[in-house]
Image (cartoon, rainbow, N blue to C red):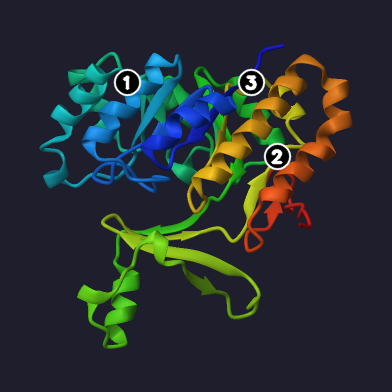
Amino acid sequence: MKKPELLVAVKRLADIEPLLEAGADALSFGETRYGLRNTGDFTLEELEKGIRLAKKKGAKVYINVNTLLHNEELDELDEYLRQLESWGADAIVFGDPAVLVTAKQVAPKLQLHWSQEMLSTSYDTINYWAEKGASRAVLARELTIDETVENKLEATCEIQAQVHGPTCIFQSRRDLVSAYFGHQGRDLDQEDTGMERGMYVKEEKRRNISYPVYEDNHGTHIISAEDICMIDGLTDFVNGEIDSLKIEGILHTSEYLIEATRIYREAIDLCAEDEDTYYEKASQFLEQIEAIQPKNRPLNTGFYYKPPIPYHT
């Protein structure tokens, strides 16, 4: 049985070797200028070092170039993509057609992974981008498991699905957090609006649920209150021959991501090699994830089984 790739988002340069030792087949990271919602923002120097290190270890590297670009941001894109190609990156993750067009012109060795959040829901749309040159589509997180497998059956390119971690539920180019602080009369030069501050928004009718919110140079982002966890539901992905399974890393520590990678590596291998034994151990894998899960981040199955099935940690 075909074994899916285990793809992990990287928080910092020092995590690359531990993640690969834990069992990651591929890594994704990026820098703040062109990368949207990176688990950790890399400098150009760190990008080069990270790509070369991962390639030396035999892993694949996918760089996030997934912002929606404005005209002034296109000026340096050519050189940036040339650099990524020369450093040995395997693919770029894109959503903006301008990135695809530019990459085909100046960095043709880079594979193109189309990722447009909630828009990547149908195989007709996926195949449109495949015809344009995309070698992979990153599926929307709102799909059920049946829809995920159906898209794989009908797609003419590789399919990637998220199996673990937070998801983005809102993004706006507007500086909403800064605007809120300004409305309160705060000194914006003194206010930290980034992810590390740990800000939250709440619904009026569900005050017990907190959604992480932060602002960067791409605008405002609101993240899900729960983490997807499919550690005990990998059979459908493996049997459905989904090409890549991703652990998303935003909001989590390096130590968490390394341990989660180790657990998913063991679970994926067992599921692909001995499905019956995997079924027997699935609850143990879930217990291992629950043991490292932050108490303020409940686990559930996302939209794979509507409505989401919550886990109790």
First in sequence: mark 2 vs mark 1? 1
Q: Which mark is residue 52?
A: 1
Amino acid bearing label 2: Met
Q: Is residue 159 left or right of residue 27?
A: right
Front residue (pair 41, 168):
41
| Foreground label between 2 and 3 | 2
Q: Which residue is mark 2?
A: 230
Q: Which residue is mark 3?
A: 153
First in sequence: mark 3 vs mark 1? 1
Amino acid bearing label 1: Arg
Which element carries disc 1, helix, strand or loop? helix
Q: Is residue 58 left or right of residue 193?
A: right
| Foreground label between 3 and 1 | 1
How far from the left and from the top, in percent, is residue 234?
Answer: 73, 31
Look at the image and tell me in which quarter the N terminus lies: top right
Amino acid bearing label 3: Leu
Q: Residue furthest bottom?
A: 185
Mark 2 and mark 1: Cα distance apart in space: 31 Å
How far from the left and from the top, in percent, is residue 301?
Answer: 71, 47
Q: Residues within 10 Å of mark 1 (few under 14, many from 20)?
A: some
User: Can residue 99 be seen here?
Assistant: yes
When the figure is inspected, residue 213 is found, relative to residue 71, above or below; the finding is: below
Which element carries disc 2, helix, strand or loop? loop
Q: Residues within 10 Å of mark 3 (few under 14, many from 20)?
A: some
Front residue (pair 284, 164):
284
How far from the left and from the top, in percent, is residue 199?
Answer: 45, 70
